[in-house]
Image (cartoon, rainbow, N blue to C red):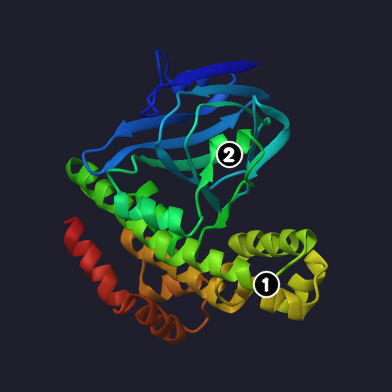
Amino acid sequence: MTYRFEYDSERNIIGKNKNQLIGDHHQGSYNYFMTKSHLLGVSWFDYKPLKPIVIEEKVADSAVCTLSFCLGEGMEWSLKERPNKILGIASNESCVLTGGAVYSKSQFEKDKHYLGLGLSFKPKDLEGVYGYLEKNNLLTSYKALTLGLERFKTYAISPRVQGILSEVIHPNIDHSLNHLYLEGKFLELISVYLDETITEMSSIKSQVSLSKEDLEALREVKNILDKSFVQPYTLSQLSRMVYLNEYKLKTGFKQIYGQTVYSYVIDRRMALSKVLLEKQPYKVGEVAAKVGYANTGHFIKAFKKKYGVTPGVMARLCRSFNQ
């Protein structure tokens, strides 16, 4: 089944709504809303097709920039001008696209969960951001891609950015203040993303050279850790699982993701513990156990180092705010 959508120069859907994808054969939602800040708009894609589908999209020529985050299954698409060139963004990766009219075709497989967030803005409205992206050669131009003049650039999503994205997806705030809360979070997301993710990645990529197989193995290590950080595998086990020696696993992971495997696991645990303390009336010891700490004291120390307060204080603040 094929769906076709057309967008104007400000990324608004013309005449249709992507929620038409929901029906007897599809599960999920697509939401797009305009903002009152310097952002042009925000799109949120949460979709699980119950049979294979194709989405064809036509976007009017414009200078709009879109910062996209892939949080579910990886996605692939092709451009009308270069149908044999497959572009793709893997799970927990991001990209920044701009410029030119776009005619694209995407394929979505049955029963896979596709989850993504896109932030669109006009360069003149966020001049400092656009200048930063352009200066550091971090933008991917659709026009250049159609002419075969540029490679498609993607960047890993750091744990800190993942934490902000989690707060966007699951806002812990009164519904009447939700729009204001999200406005602030989106701007925070852009600034942290530029400071921590893209700068770090571009700097790292200029320093080292890893084979395609090495990069795929390191990406798989990260995927494994994302699913097992509560009870993580040892470096030796990870090495055998992805067929990469321990030295290259340790050094390569830090080069690509900016932190050691151990630090990455700790960050994921801390992010989960913060969500648990905010959402549920758990005791500190219970949260420690749920995120993989046998020793509550070690958990408290790690939490305070990360957030500046103990988990007990965090829990009390959250309960007080929610009352």
Whether the residues at callouts 1 and 2 have beta carbons within 8 Å, the answer is: no
Residue 109 position in % (x across, y down): 68, 31
- Mark 2 secondary-structure assignment: helix
User: Which residue in the protein does label 1 denote?
Assistant: 208
Identity of the residue drawn at 61% across and 68% down: 206
Which circle's residue, 1 or 2, is located before the other in the chain? 2
- Mark 1 secondary-structure assignment: loop
Q: Residues within 10 Å of mark 1 (few under 14, many from 20)?
A: few
Callout in the foreground (1, 2): 2
Residue 131 position in % (x across, y down): 37, 54
- In the displayed structure, would residue 254 be above or below residue 213? below
Residue 184 position in % (x across, y down): 25, 52
- In the displayed structure, would residue 251 be above or below residue 171? below
User: Which residue in the protein does label 2 denote?
Assistant: 144
* Residue nearest the observer in this picture, 236 or 64: 64
Instruction: Work out whether residue 232 can be spotted.
Output: no
- In the displayed structure, would residue 239 be above or below residue 78? below
* Residue nearest the observer in this picture, 133 or 320: 133
Identity of the residue drawn at 49% across and 36% down: 46
Q: Quadrant of the N terminus?
A: top right
Identity of the residue drawn at 57% across and 45% down: 72
User: Is 56 left or right of 219, judged from the image as shown?
Assistant: left
The amino acid type, in three-letter code, at marker 1 is Val
The amino acid type, in three-letter code, at marker 2 is Ala
Identity of the residue drawn at 23% across and 70% down: 316
